[in-house]
Amino acid sequence: MKKYLILYKPFLLFLAVFFLTYIVLTFLYQNYLNSFEENKTDSITKMVGKNTEQVLLLFVDDAAIEESTAHPYMKLFYNTKYVARIVEGCNAVSVIILFLSFVIAFSGKLITTVLYIVGGSLVIYLLNVLRIAALSALIFYFPKQEALLHEVLFPLYIYGVVFILWLIWVRKFSRYASNGN
């Protein structure tokens, strides 16, 4: 048994750090969410909504965001039509937590790791805002495709971005990166 623990130590260490980081960050995020009153939208989701509205206003004159008074979400209007709601799950924090957990589990030099975490998190956040803006516009023009867009294409897009960021991290910056490339 000891032989296998030694043989698989890097993998087991990765799993332990990954899950520990993921659990701690998820716990902290849940505590943050629990600090808001019931049926109140959290600040991050509000910020994502506001940023989405700003992006949409670059392309159309009539885009608006409005906080629901009865539920914890933001209503998104595109050309005066209510097309989507931005809920806590749309704010990409859970995706960023997944990203952070992986990078920390494969950490490299401290400054490189911190810079990649900050940069990668910003990339995920910005691409998520663009994702919501594009999704709302597409739902306006193609309402019958909402399920395909929301449940298949756009999750594939955001998780694809995270996967690419992970690949870049492992190949170029982590302690396992090959120095020859």
Image (cartoon, rainbow, N blue to C red):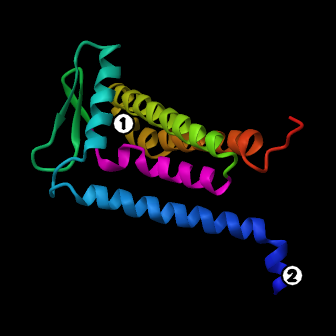
Q: Is residue 148 visible?
A: yes
In the displayed structure image, the side of residue 42 where residue 122 appears, left or right: right
Determine the secondary structure under disc 2. Answer: helix
Task: Give the quarter of the figure containing the N terminus.
Answer: bottom right
Q: Residue at x 82, y 75 (%)?
A: 6
Percent coordinates x, y for residue 67 in the rendering: 16, 38
In the displayed structure image, the side of residue 14 where residue 154 appears, left or right: left
Mark linked to residue 144: 1
Determine the secondary structure under disc 1. Answer: helix
The chief SS type of the magenta part is: helix
Percent coordinates x, y for residue 124 in the rendering: 50, 37
Precedes in sequence: disc 2 or disc 1: 2
Which residue is under mark 2?
3
Q: Residue at x 22, y 39 (%)?
A: 74
Task: Give the quarter of the figure containing the C terminus.
Answer: top right
Q: What residue type is disc 2 on?
A: Lys
**Number of numbered discs visible in the structure rendering:** 2
Percent coordinates x, y for residue 78 in the rendering: 26, 24
Magenta region: which residues? 85-106
Q: Quadrant of residue 162?
A: top right
Q: Is residue 161 visible?
A: no
